[in-house]
Amino acid sequence: MAEGNVATPFLEMRSFVREESEVFASETLTPALGSPFVSVYELDGHAEYLDPEQEAYSTLVQELYDEEFDEALFELMVEARGLHEEHMVSSAQSVEGERLLNQHFNQLIREVENSVTAFEREFGAREASSLSEAELDSFAERYSPSTTLSPELENFFGKWKKKLVGLAKKAGKFAMKIGLGPVLNKIKALIKPLLNKVLQMAIGKLPEAVRPAAQQLADRIFNRTPKTSDDSAAASSPDASAADAGSAVQAAAGASVTEIQQEFDQQLANLFMASDEVDMELEVARVRNGDREQAVPVYSDLDQARERFVNELQQLKEGEDPAPYIQNFLPAVLPALRLGIKLIGRDKVVGFLANLLAKLITKLIGPEAAPALSRAIVDAGLKLMTLEVSSQDEARAAASSVAATVEETVRRVSALPDYVLDNQELLEGFALEAFEQAAAANLPPILSEAVYGERPDLLESRSAKTCWIMLPLRRRKRYKKCGRTFKVRISPYTADEIESFEGPLADYLQDQLGVEEGAEVEAEVSLYETLPGTTLPDIAREESEMPGMGATGTKGAAQFHPLTPKAAGLLLGEPRMGRNTPPGSDRQNVGVGQRLYRLAIAGKRQLTTPGTDGRPHLRRHGGIRVALDCPKDEIRIRVFLSEVKAQRLAVRVRRQSHPGAVAAGFQKYVGRRLGAIIRGERLSRIRLIQPGLTPGDAHGAALKRLPAEVLAALTARLQECVVTAFAEFVKGQSQQLMTAVEDTADGITLKFTILRPAGLQQLGKALLPGGQAAGLADAIQSGSKPDVRVEVHPGHKHD
């Protein structure tokens, strides 16, 4: 294979500008094909003047969110996807699989609707404010479905009852103009659309773009005229920030379960705050109409287009131009990316990109070039992934790697800011760089050592035996796998430095695998990369036969950790193989192109504990959740200590260790997690309750608007309050702590309620669009010490 110019080894020309007279004009975007459940709505100003009804409505939407219901929705989606995948061998069976899936879940829909009917019969005639929490909880505990449900459906049903009870509790706090009975009656009509969204998410379909429901919340709060579809499309197309320009990782186009719950909460609030039954009927009609919107199989369309593109590359004749095939492939890639909508409507950019990529891959495909690439892929890992490698597998692997390079290049280009996309010269340079980065990520070393000596950036790994292979070879899978596994020795110091989704890797090793504190372990590390439409349970299900992958579904998902540059450097000695995680990434929401690793440790399996349903459940990760509740003028911080951490704490308390010494260890645990949460790095761990915030902002995004000194001041003050209160609690109420630890529940939850903290009201206003943060850091730091209530509960508790 020719080496070409060292400066741009994939292209033997200094420039690929077509004609100087051709310029890229800014083009109007077509309606978005991204997430149908957008987590933000657009605000033209800030919510400085809300009347009491608007304020109550906004607050109700934020308070209805339930993190446990998120977990239930996700587990339901995982089960639905698993059932559907069993019927995905052919397109005909896929249709049959969808029918069987709907039939299976119709039972759950009926039972959930029946529970609302029973709730209405029991409490519908009474004033919501007269209902006590005790009688609501008691009724929910007694009520059971009329038929036997599968464990996964039963789990969702239990979380639904808690959600329903929470609705009734909150209804009593807000001025309902219509009785509880009529509202409950209308809630039944929302159940099927809610569960349909989960099923559509499971089978990889996205509804056609419509005006986001979140926009309607903004219209309701601010009495605005609804925007046109063109306005909404433009507003919902976020620009990539400079830090994300050309990033290989971005959020998927599909909705997350959190966004689905947010939309559902808005629908519930519309019913609770309706002025009459006509308003409620209109809301139900709107939801039903939305449920009838045609859904598009975005991810399966991409699967089929990718398969077709790979076959076309395999059959390419010598000297044949691949541009037409790339041109046909790109339209399937863009809808599967959240930022892909930026390229939809920019036909000149897409055409330019197809022609450029055609020139760049000509040295890699065709009868003469492909065999060399095929052999390199086999040597770089394909042999390690399968016992038999046929000539057909070799040829397909080469075409798949080229297709993966093209797809990642498009993903990187779609993340470029508008000023690059609309400037011909800038786009030329950035697109070439995007291709070279994608080639380094997806192709084995195919150039000479001299080229790599001058251009080390064209290699991700120093090893010639490292290559990411896009699966399937024989069946459809939505992820890549590195053909090389790594044998590593992990010291306790290394494990403590590497961050996973919930905290340091050390916590996973100790809390979920039972590794002794301070012990070194030897592990085999497998590496994965996501494609559009994948979830961690998908990978766990497909890899269930691999060593150490005994668990599948959500249990199997707990075995994966983000392969960040730091993790790749410390574990593998290959930092360039890692990728930064997108904001808000967690085990339920992984980005497209995100890299992950899994550890297989001899003799170690994930620890389980008996659940209330009698089945074994995976031990929970420790972690922290924060709620800044401006209407109540309080901050709630829940610290969940895993069973291992709780038992260690109990040992120290039994030994009557000095409270200050016990608090020092607690401070270390809280400190490293709290700072990341307040900085907005773990969006799923924080809630901001402030009238006027968008749904996305209420889940932590608004924190990014605050200056760094404000976030630092808030972190320091919260840490001071929590650690001081913990020391006093251990000193004066250690018996309560011991009672919780000795309970059979998994772990303990410490709940800290900080009452009337200094600066919170000012902080709430600063969080709103257009809010001012001047003097806020001083206000937080200089205020008097607030009162802090401490509670301890066995097991995992939520608000």
Image (tube, grey):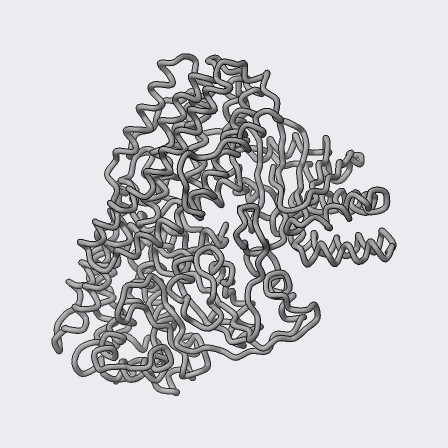
Using the rendered image of the protein, determine whether residue 296 is visible from the camera's viewpoint.
Answer: yes
Residue drawn where x is 79% and y is 58% of the image: 651
Decide: is 670 above or below 67: below
Residue drawn where x is 72% and y is 50% of the image: 741
Name the spot of residue 157 as percent of width and height, x first. 46, 38
Residue drawn where x is 65% and y is 49% of the image: 745
Q: Is residue 248 left or right of residue 765?
A: left
Decide: is 598 above or below 789: below
Q: Quadrant of residue 566?
A: bottom right
Q: Quadrant of residue 371?
A: bottom left
Q: Is residue 714 left or right of residue 681?
A: right
Query: Considering depth in this image, is 152 or 791 the residue closer to the camera?
Result: 152
Query: Considering depth in this image, is 729 or 627 the residue closer to the camera?
Result: 729
Name the spot of residue 770 as percent of width and height, x first. 53, 33
Name the spot of residue 350 as percent of width and height, x first. 24, 55
Q: Is residue 655 left or right of residue 459?
A: right
Query: Considering depth in this image, is 289 or 79 the residue closer to the camera?
Result: 79
Can you name the residue that lies furthest to the front here?
A: 147
Q: Quadrant of the N terminus?
A: bottom left
Q: Quadrant of the C terminus?
A: top right
Can you name the residue that lies furthest to the bottom here?
A: 449
Using the rendered image of the protein, determine whether residue 694 is visible from the camera's viewpoint.
Answer: no
Name the spot of residue 198 as percent of width and height, x first. 37, 42
User: What is the number of callouts on the image?
Assistant: 0
Query: Considering depth in this image, is 275 or 25 the residue closer to the camera?
Result: 275
